[in-house]
Image (cartoon, rainbow, N blue to C red):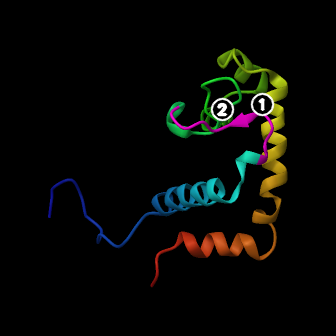
Amino acid sequence: MSSSGPTRPLAMKTFTEVRARESALESRCMAHLIDWSDCPVLESVPGKVSGAWVFRGTRVPVSAVLKNLKHLSLAELVEEFPSLRREEIETVLEFLARSSEPVFSGEATTAIIVHAHSAR
C-alpha cells in the first residue's frame, strides 16, 4: 500500500468519475443519433478538417462551437469565431434542440443511461 493514502479497488469509481464517463458516452450517443446532414449551415467534406462537420464554407468544426458554449455567450462565440455569423450558430442550436427532443424524453433517456453503465 502506498503512503499517499488508502487505495480503492480498481472496479470502484467515485461518483465524479462515473458521471464523467456517462457524460462522455451520452455525448457520443448524441453525435451518432443526430443527422447533421439535415442542418443547412453545416457540411462534411472528406479531407477538410478530417471530414468533421464544419460550418459551411469554413474550417470551424461544430464541435468546437458546442464545447465553447459552456464558457461563452452567443455574442462571445461570434467574437471567438469571426468567420461565423450569429444566425449560423443560432441555426445549429435550433437544429440541435429539435434533433435531441426524442432522445431526452420518455424511454430514450433510460436507454442512454442503461447503455452508459457497464454490465454487472
42 is within the stretch colored magenta: yes
- Magenta residue span: 38-47
Amino acid marked by disc 2: Val
In front of the other: 29 or 72: 29
Compared to residue 2, the image places residue 119 above or below, namely below
Identify the residue at image location x=64%, y=69%.
112
Q: Quadrant of residue 67?
A: top right
Q: Is 61 situated above or below 104?
A: above
The reply to whether discs 2 and 1 touch (Cβ–Cβ < 8 Å) is yes
For residue 72, side relative to residue 117 (left or right): right
| Outermost residue, front side | 46
Find the distance from the CA under tag 2 to the CA under tag 1: 8 Å
Residue 113 percent coordinates (x, y): 62, 71
x and y percentages locating residue 25 in the rendered image: 55, 60
Q: Is residue 40 left or right of residue 120?
A: right
Would you say 2 lies left or right of 23 here? Answer: left
Q: Which residue is mark 1?
A: 89
Report the disc number at residue 62.
none
In the picture, the quarter occupied by the N terminus is bottom left
Looking at the image, tell me whether mark 2 or mark 1 is earlier in sequence order.
2
Residue in view at x 30 percent, y 68 percent: 8
Crowd rating for badge 2 (residues with CA inside 10 Å; few <14, some 14–19, many 20+): many
Viewer-nearest residue: 77 or 61: 61
Locate residue 96, reporting x and y percent: 78, 47
Q: Quadrant of residue 53?
A: top right
Per the image, the residue denoted by label 2 is 65
What SS does tag 1 mark? helix
Residue at x-position 68% and y-position 34%:
69
